[in-house]
Amino acid sequence: MDYPDHQRGKASSGIKKNGLMPVLENIDLEVEDGEFVCIVGPSGCGKSTLLNIVGGFLKATRGEVLIDGAAVVGPDPRRIFIFQENGTFPWLTVEDNIGFGLLDKTPEDRERIVSHYLKMVGLSGTERSYPRELSGGMKQRVEIARALAGSPDILYMDEPFGALDFLTRLRMRAELVELWQREKKTVLFVTHDVDEAVQLADRIVVMSTRPASIRSVIEVKLPRPRDLDAAEYLSIRDEIFEIMGFGPTEASAPQDATDNGDAAAASTRSDSPPLLRPKKLDADVIIIGGGPAASVLGTYLANAGVDHLIVDKSHHPRAHVGESLSYSTTEILREIGFLPVMERQRFPVKGGVSWTSWLNPQQINMEFDKLEKGGYAYQVDRAQFDELLLRHAREKGSRVFSGARVERVNFTRTGQASGVTLKVGEAKFTLKSSLVIDASGRRGLLGKQLNLFKQAPELPQFAIHSWFTGVNRGDEPTANFTHIHLLPIKRGWCWQIPINDEITSVGIVSGREHHVRSGEDVEQFFKWTMGLNPVLGERMSNAQRLREFRMDGNYCYSMERFAGDGWLMIGDAAFFVDPIFSSGVSDALHSAKFAAEAIISARANNDLSAASFEEFERKMRLGVTVWQDFVKLFYQMAPIFSQVINTSEHSARMMRVCEGEVYDEEARQTVEQLGGVFDAIQADPNHALNRILKDFDAGVTT
Ligand SMILES: Cc1cc2nc3c(=O)[nH]c(=O)nc-3n(C[C@H](O)[C@H](O)[C@H](O)COP(=O)(O)OP(=O)(O)OC[C@H]3O[C@@H](n4cnc5c(N)ncnc54)[C@H](O)[C@@H]3O)c2cc1C
């Protein structure tokens, strides 16, 4: 369909054929009865021309328009136009404007119809007013009511809300949707506003520049009224922008934020509209969270030259539970070049784990020396450790955006992760990426969004913890070990973790049955528990609490999947099993390392689909299964656990599992072997450890 441009009095600058400038080319579009179709495209591309031709106001030089099989030869009262410019008749009252096309009706019918549509557009009471007495939005509603009153088959709307102010426009769109849902008229709606199109249409026709052709037709299946913040909404909107060749909008504020790591200031400075896409923050990989998992992944990616952005809602330093690092973290910290920082900070070096039981006060040690001469791990103040780790990532090349909370991960309509929507103060941003990694910790942002979160019902554990001075840590050389004291309550134990020379972290873990209930005195509960194990009671006899008690509960869970099209989960965002083996940071670091390997290889193969992450998924699943089996076994054999491990011919292998080496088949076999040993002890009433088990079980309050 071509249109002779000179008839519209415009200078022609495109390709001319015989003095004619083609405005539209190869337009082939079918519209269903009752469908709402929006036409968008760059301004001046010919959208309105198309509508005028379809409406019979202009004649195409080639091609035809058919409605119900009949060619359109001119305007038709069954098909009504609503323009941007106010089309009301100024000399007629509101009711006469609406009833203008109803002169063939009886006065009664006319009045009934006018009053029906007046009410529908919310203008009852303005019957006798003249258009000049109405606001722009009201005048536009009069025009819509007039159009609908004529009971047209089709409504052609050419930028009908273009002249209205922002709020009125939003209101009018909502009203139009409501009206359309009730009346189900066929609507062809031209707009240059992509948001408007996504909010209104069943299908969106995206036009190219002149000579305009149809670039794409996008179906919008979202329910109405549409949530303008919904991920699907945003992804359709972004897709249209991209088809139209528009890049994301620029926003300087968050860029400043990455430079100085402080987005809060940026948000208060920004007076931008509420939804922006700050192009400079888009990244190949977006990592949600700024804990150990995110920082270590960031460091690996930076070392491999992969562009990425870490987004953390917190500003570091921030307090965090999880202060004892297991042996297997040390190798990864070495690999990312972080050990010199650990040494400079003089974090206490941990040479093993000691165990005591309320039945047997004798301390049993599991020493890392058994694994490797000079093997060690660390005890850390997590606020300091996490801040340093994030700083390390930044120094290696990670871009970091702090103080920005990711609200959700966005997906394309084909289900590929395409970025995130985040909030800084009151401002919202969408950022694009080809991969999104959830490292948001126990919040499990993506797992919850995708409904993959699965609580471990057999381990409903709770913990109460704080920092103390004056805690006796026992004698050297085990003073800086992690000390575990078993308690005579179901799945009950206490940790003592040295934070520095003065401060010790102490926490009680127990099954939900023994968790302090609301209204109970936490201090009293804590004191009572300290007395349940004589060694623990003695070690805490001079302890002074330094800060408020903190509580954590129901923390044993796993996501049903750890990777999908364009996304992965690492650290606590993927799973957490139990704190008994101080394994959380180790799992965070291992999963970060596996994710880095998976990402680098997927990018090299140019395939970011779930299929590329199968090996990651497999390794992670193996790790969780080994942990879950191991922890369950531990709680069954707690009073004899350390003795069995220390005396087993597979002692070193079992200790390696305790210390986080759970991601291979050997680990799975080791857990099976341990289970076999435990079964044999249980089955043999004459076994020395069988008695301990029985005594322990008899003394435990369930
Ligand atoms: C009682 C208890 C005791 C524990 N003891 C130990 C121990 O001794 N040793 C050990 O290794 N582990 C321990 N853990 C586990 C340990 O705390 C975690 O496994 C570890 O912190 C996981 O690291 P991460 O990086 O995955 O998550 P986190 O360290 O939790 O970091 C997540 C980050 O994501 C950010 N974030 C969250 N939501 C958003 C969002 N929407 N947008 C942007 N950012 C977001 C947060 O601000 C945070 O900085 C313990 C856990 C519990 C419950």
Image: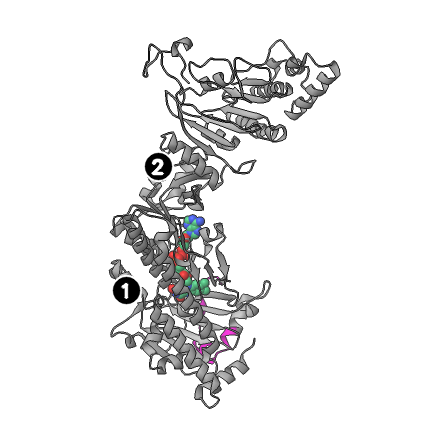
State which tag comes first along the sequence, 2 or 1.
Answer: 2
Instruction: Give the residue at x 55% y 25%.
Output: 187
Contact between labelled residues 1 and 2, with CB atoms less than 8 Å apart = no
Residue 539: in magenta span: yes
Regarding residue 269, the answer to whether it shows in the image is yes
Q: Place residue 60 in its image quadrant.
A: top left
Across and down, in percent, residue 479 comes to 35, 75
x, y percent for residue 460: 52, 66
Image quarter of residue 674: bottom left
**Judging from the image, what secondary structure is the residue with disc 2 in?**
helix
Residue most toward the right? 108
Q: Against 36, is 131 above or below?
A: above
Q: Position of residue 257 (x, y in %)?
A: 35, 41
Which residue in the rendered view is the most extreme toward the bottom? 686
Q: Which residue is mark 1?
A: 331
Q: Is residue 676 left or right of residue 347?
A: right
Crowding at label 1, few (<14), some or many (≥20) Cα neighbours within 10 Å? some
User: Which residue is label 2 attached to?
Assistant: 279
Q: Is residue 184 above or below residue 398?
A: above
Q: Which residues are magenta?
A: 529-549
Q: Secondary structure at mark 1?
A: helix
Identify the residue at image location x=68%, y=22%: 124
Q: What amino acid type is highlighted by mark number 1? A: Glu
Of all residues, the one furthest to the front in this rendering is: 69
Residue 86 within the magenta-colored segment of the rendering: no
Mark 2–mark 1 distance (CA, rounded to whole Å): 37 Å
Quarter of the image containing the C terminus?
Answer: bottom right
Q: Amino acid at mark 2?
A: Lys
